[in-house]
Image (cartoon, grey):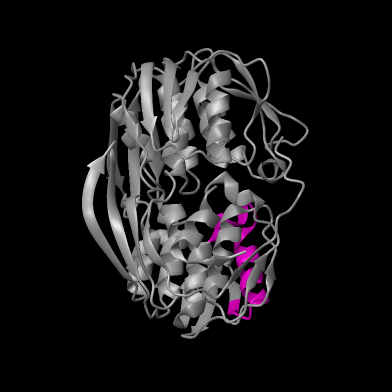
């Protein structure tokens, strides 16, 4: 278990212009999948730019415990020798995923199609997160969750299916994790496994499955949805992966550069997958000066460099259907909205209540603690800015949540008074070099 028992408070204060070129850490979603797909391929997969945060390291240890060989060759440079689809071995011990929600849910899917028994656990925060939505389709495919005292929460044991059944499954919410778990289980099933989404969620799993040689067809379904069909029992071939910069991590320096007067920052090699750039779309609607430079295609994904200049922002209405493409970025968007002129309404944020913390309530509490006018209306977050710097001066409870901590440190960089977060320890789960990288641009973080 990850016991972060010594909280590390951190403070951000008003900074002079942020300047420079940076490369944000590798994308977390792709890093988890690179390790998993490498483990399911026959032969050696090389991965460059892997995010070496705690969440991804937990996934690397899990695939190793399941029989793959994982070797770190240098910074961000890894190799995975896989065991093939359906080849996972029964691990000797419980797989401890720490705080990694993506890691645990995707691995549950990959294990569900193998005739093995695997125990899953995580830290106190991960133990609170719902697993039932993943277990429901996996049970339909023949896996069995050996219910623990906690019902559908960790710790729990999954017995994979001896003869997995291909299913057609309509996801109850737009969730790349549910979709990916079903498709990963479907790798071991004969015939076609289909996932139907009413709202398209991020499509890294489909892109990487294709990159590794699986047959996947993704078609439009309804107004905003997708129907994804996988042909089961492929032999996955090793394929090199270059992990692009994580747009969810890029969100923090992007918003900081927009808010701190006189700033100009270039972020190199950021993924611009259309299903991940809801934040950039929204910030541009608010008047943000974000320029796309040198768009290119690498390892199955679209990437580009982004030039961001300090901008005057105005409030906007953010439609609910944009939520899947920016679900992790609403916290830092709310910070940007605090400096905009007028009201920003972010609609349909129910999913934020079941993340690392209840992010909806925690974001509103943090804004109020720093003198920002905001309210929660149903599943909407409304932030009212007056076009000036936020007052600041508050201390924010981070609830063991890395994105809350980083979002409110960004608030402090442009606020009138310093902003303190009660614990910055968890930033290491996704962005270990956050403080160092921001200081390199000129941010006042102590």
- Vertical side of 90 occupied by 239: above or below: below
Main SS category, magenta section: helix
Q: Which residues are magenta?
A: 349-374
In this rendering, would 107 be left or right of 118? left
Depth check: give the residue in front, 118 or 37: 37
Depth check: give the residue in front, 442 or 223: 442
Q: Residue at x 43, y 22 (%)?
A: 80
Let me know if residue 160 is in the magenta part: no
Depth check: give the residue in front, 236 or 13: 13
Let me know if residue 370 is in the magenta part: yes
Q: Is residue 371 visible?
A: yes
In this rendering, would 219 be left or right of 158? left
In this rendering, would 154 be left or right of 49? right
Quarter in which the N terminus is drawn: top right
Quarter in which the C terminus is drawn: bottom right
Number of labels in the image equals 0
- Vertical side of 205 occupied by 144: above or below: above
Q: Quadrant of residue 29?
A: top left
Where residue 56 sits in the image (x, y, percent)?
Answer: 53, 36
Where residue 277 sits in the image (x, y, percent)?
Answer: 36, 56
Where residue 300 sits in the image (x, y, percent)?
Answer: 28, 37
Where residue 64 sits in the image (x, y, percent)?
Answer: 54, 20
Depth check: give the residue in front, 62 or 262: 262
- Vertical side of 360 occupied by 302: above or below: above
Q: Is residue 166 visible?
A: no
């Amino acid at each position: 278990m990850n016991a972060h028992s010594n909280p590390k408070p951190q403070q951000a204060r008003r900074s002079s212009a942020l300047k420079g070129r940076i490369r944000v850490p590798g994308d977390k979603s792709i890093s988890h999948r690179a390790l998993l797909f490498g483990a399911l391929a026959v032969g050696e997969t090389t991965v460059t730019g892997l995010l070496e945060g705690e969440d991804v390291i937990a996934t690397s240890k899990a695939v190793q415990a399941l029989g793959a060989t994982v070797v770190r060759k240098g910074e961000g440079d890894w190799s995975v020798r896989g065991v093939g689809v359906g080849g996972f071995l029964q691990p000797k011990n419980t797989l401890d995923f720490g705080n990694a929600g993506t890691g645990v849910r995707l691995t549950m899917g990959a294990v569900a199609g193998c005739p093995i028994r695997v125990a899953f656990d995580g830290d106190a925060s991960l133990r609170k997160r719902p697993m039932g939505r993943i277990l429901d389709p996996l049970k339909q495919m023949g896996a069995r969750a050996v219910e623990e005292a906690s019902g559908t929460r960790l710790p729990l044991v999954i017995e994979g299916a001896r003869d997995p059944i291909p299913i057609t499954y309509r996801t109850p919410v737009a969730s790349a994790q549910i979709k990916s778990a079903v498709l990963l289980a479907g790798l071991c099933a004969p015939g076609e496994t289909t996932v139907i989404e009413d709202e398209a969620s991020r499509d890294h799993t489909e892109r990487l499955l294709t990159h590794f040689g699986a047959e996947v067809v993704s078609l439009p379904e309804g107004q905003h949805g997708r129907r994804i069909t996988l042909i089961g029992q492929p032999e996955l071939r090793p394929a090199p992966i270059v992990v692009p910069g994580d747009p969810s991590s890029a969100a923090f320096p992007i918003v900081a550069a927009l808010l701190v007067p006189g700033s100009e920052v270039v972020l190199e090699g950021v993924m611009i997958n259309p299903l991940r750039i809801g934040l950039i779309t929204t910030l541009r609607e608010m008047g943000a000066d974000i320029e796309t430079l040198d768009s290119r295609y690498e390892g199955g994904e679209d990437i580009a460099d982004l030039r961001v200049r300090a901008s005057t922002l105005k409030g906007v209405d953010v439609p609910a259907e944009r939520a899947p493409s920016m679900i992790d970025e609403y916290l830092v968007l709310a910070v940007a909205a605090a400096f905009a002129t007028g009201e920003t309404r972010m609609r349909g944020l129910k999913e934020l209540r079941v993340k690392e913390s209840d992010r909806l309530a925690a974001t509103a509490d943090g804004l109020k603690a720093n003198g920002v006018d905001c309210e929660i209306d149903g599943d909407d977050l409304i932030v009212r800015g007056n076009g000036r710097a936020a007052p600041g001066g508050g201390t924010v409870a981070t609830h063991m949540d890395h994105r809350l901590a980083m979002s409110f440190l960004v608030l402090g960089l442009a606020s009138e008074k310093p902003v303190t977060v009660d614990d910055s320890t968890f930033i290491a789960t996704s962005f270990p070099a956050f403080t160092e990288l921001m200081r390199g641009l000129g941010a006042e973080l102590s």
